[in-house]
C-alpha cells in the first residue's frame, strides 16, 4: 500500500521492450534506501516489484496488463517519473490509501493558475468518473490529490506549488495523459451494497447496520 506522497522524481535509464511486456530501469536515490529485491515501488502510481538493484537504480518487470492500462507504455529513456516506496507499518499516513493499481488513463484538458494554486482538469471515462467525488481523493501519476470539481466528462484538482515542484506535475502540459487511480473504498462499498443488483436498496442507517457496517 502507498500513500500518494511522492518521495522523489526518478529518471528512466532504460526500457527493454518485449512482445507484450517490458523491463524498466530507473535511476533513483531516496527510494533505494533499505530497498530489497522483491520490494514494491510505485512508478507514476503503478506498483512494480523490484527485480534487480544497482548502486544508483532499480529494475522492474512491467506486464502486458500494466502497459495496456497505464501511461508506462509511453515512457522513454530520460523520462521523469514519480517514485514512492510502499508505506512502512510505522510510517505516517500523509495522503490516502493508494494501491498502485491504476484504473485507467486520463487526459489533461486544461491547466490554469488561480493565485498560487494550479488547477488541472482531467478528462476520463465514465466508468472512472463514477468513483470520483468532489472533496474526495484521487491519485494522478501516484500523487494523492483532493478532487475540487467533477462533471460528466472530467474532474479537476487544485495543486499547491510545492506539490507541483516535487512531482512530475511540473512537466505536464495540456494534452498529456496521466495515470488515474480512484479511491478503492468507493469500489468496495459499491460491491458490498450491490450483491444483488436487481434488488438494490436505498442505503439507510438500518441497511448499513444489517450488512455489518
Image: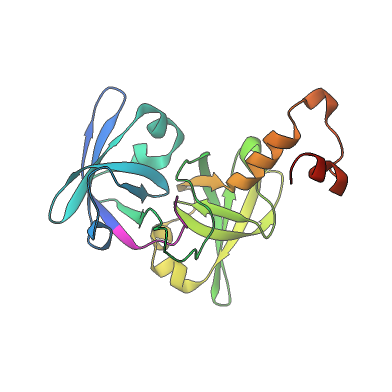
* Residue 148 shown in magenta: no
Viewer-proximal residue, 92 or 18? 92
Magenta stretch, main secondary structure, is loop
Name of the residue lying farthest toward the bottom: 115
Quadrant of the rendered structure where residue 80 is? bottom left
The picture places residue 110, in percent across and down from the top left corner, at 56, 56
Viewer-proximal residue, 88 or 16? 88
Q: Is residue 160 left or right of residue 38?
A: right
Residue at image point 71% right, 44% down: 152
The picture places residue 36, in percent across and down from the top left corner, at 23, 49
Q: Is residue 166 left or right of residue 209?
A: left
Name of the residue lying farthest toward the left: 55
Q: Is residue 130 visible?
A: no
Q: Is residue 40 visible?
A: yes
Residue at image point 40% right, 61% down: 6
Quadrant of the rendered structure where residue 124 is? top right
The picture places residue 68, in percent across and down from the top left corner, at 42, 30
* Residue 7 shown in magenta: yes
Q: How many marks?
A: 0
Viewer-proximal residue, 211 or 103? 211
Q: Which residues are magenta?
A: 1-9
User: In the displayed structure, would residue 190 be above or below residue 97?
Assistant: above
Viewer-proximal residue, 86 or 68? 86
Q: Is residue 21 left or right of residue 208?
A: left
Residue at image point 44% right, 62% down: 5
The picture places residue 184, in percent across and down from the top left corner, at 58, 45
Residue at image point 30% right, 47% down: 39
Q: Is residue 84 left or right of residue 173?
A: left
Amino acid at each position: 500500500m502507498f500513500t500518494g506522497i511522492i518521495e522523489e522524481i526518478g529518471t528512466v535509464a532504460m526500457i527493454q521492450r518485449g512482445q507484450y511486456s517490458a523491463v524498466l530501469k530507473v535511476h533513483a536515490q531516496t527510494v533505494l534506501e533499505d530497498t530489497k529485491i522483491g520490494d514494491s515501488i510505485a512508478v507514476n502510481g503503478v506498483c512494480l516489484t523490484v527485480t534487480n538493484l544497482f548502486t544508483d537504480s532499480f529494475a522492474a518487470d512491467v506486464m502486458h496488463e500494466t502497459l495496456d492500462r497505464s501511461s508506462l507504455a509511453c515512457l522513454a529513456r530520460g523520462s521523469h517519473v514519480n517514485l514512492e516506496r510502499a508505506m512502512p507499518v510505522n510510517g505516517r499516513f500523509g495522503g490516502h490509501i493508494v494501491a498502485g493499481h491504476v484504473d485507467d488513463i486520463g487526459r489533461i484538458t486544461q491547466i490554469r493558475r488561480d493565485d498560487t494554486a494550479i488547477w488541472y482538469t482531467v478528462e476520463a471515462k465514465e466508468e472512472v468518473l463514477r468513483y470520483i467525488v468532489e472533496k474526495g481523493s484521487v491519485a494522478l501519476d501516484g500523487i494523492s490529490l483532493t478532487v475540487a470539481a467533477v462533471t460528466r466528462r472530467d474532474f479537476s484538482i487544485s495543486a499547491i506549488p510545492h506539490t507541483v515542484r516535487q512531482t512530475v506535475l511540473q512537466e505536464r502540459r495540456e494534452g498529456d495523459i496521466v495515470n488515474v487511480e480512484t479511491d478503492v473504498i468507493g469500489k468496495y462499498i459499491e460491491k458490498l451494497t450491490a450483491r444483488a443488483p436487481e434488488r438494490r436498496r436505498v442505503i439507510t442507517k438500518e441497511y448499513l447496520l444489517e450488512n455489518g457496517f
